[in-house]
Image (tube, rainbow, N blue to C red):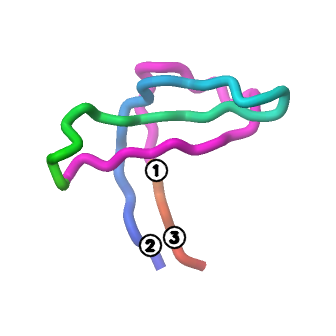
């Protein structure tokens, strides 16, 4: 069951360790209920950089 799907611009990519990075999107307009934030760890080699747009999908399985 899909819970939410949205598109966002990556603000920052953090180096976590040798195996993974963290993709972050934290819009400064936190009071707007339509703005969703995320921080998600991903394996290295993803090719995503700050400014790229991504689609985030959360599903319950």
Is there a contact, CB below 8 Å, between mark 2 and mark 1? Answer: no
Q: Residue at x 68, y 31 (%)?
A: 21
User: How far, Cα to Cα, is label 3 from label 1?
Assistant: 10 Å
Q: Residue at x 25, y 32 (%)?
A: 28
User: How far, Cα to Cα, is label 2 from label 3?
Assistant: 4 Å
Q: Is residue 45 above or below residue 61?
A: above
- Observer-nearest of 51 and 22: 22
Q: Residue furthest front?
A: 31
Q: Earlier in the sequence, mark 2 or mark 3?
A: 2
Q: Is residue 41 above or below residue 6?
A: above
Q: Residue at x 75, y 27 (%)?
A: 45
**Image quadrant assignment for residue 22:** top right
Residue 9: x %, y % from top left? 37, 31
Residue 48: x %, y % from top left? 58, 26
Q: Quickly name the residue at label 2.
A: 2
Is there a contact, CB below 8 Å, between mark 2 and mark 3? Answer: yes
Residue 35: x %, y % from top left? 24, 47
Q: Quickly name the residue at label 3.
A: 59
Direction from residue 55 to residue 28 in the image, left or right: left
Q: Quickly name the residue at label 1.
A: 56
């Amino acid at each position: 069951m899909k819970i939410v799907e949205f598109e966002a611009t990556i603000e920052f990519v953090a180096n976590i360790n040798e195996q993974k990075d963290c993709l972050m999107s934290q819009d400064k307009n936190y009071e707007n209920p339509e703005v969703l934030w995320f921080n998600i760890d991903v394996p290295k080699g993803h090719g995503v950089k700050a400014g790229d747009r991504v689609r985030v999908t959360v599903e319950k399985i």
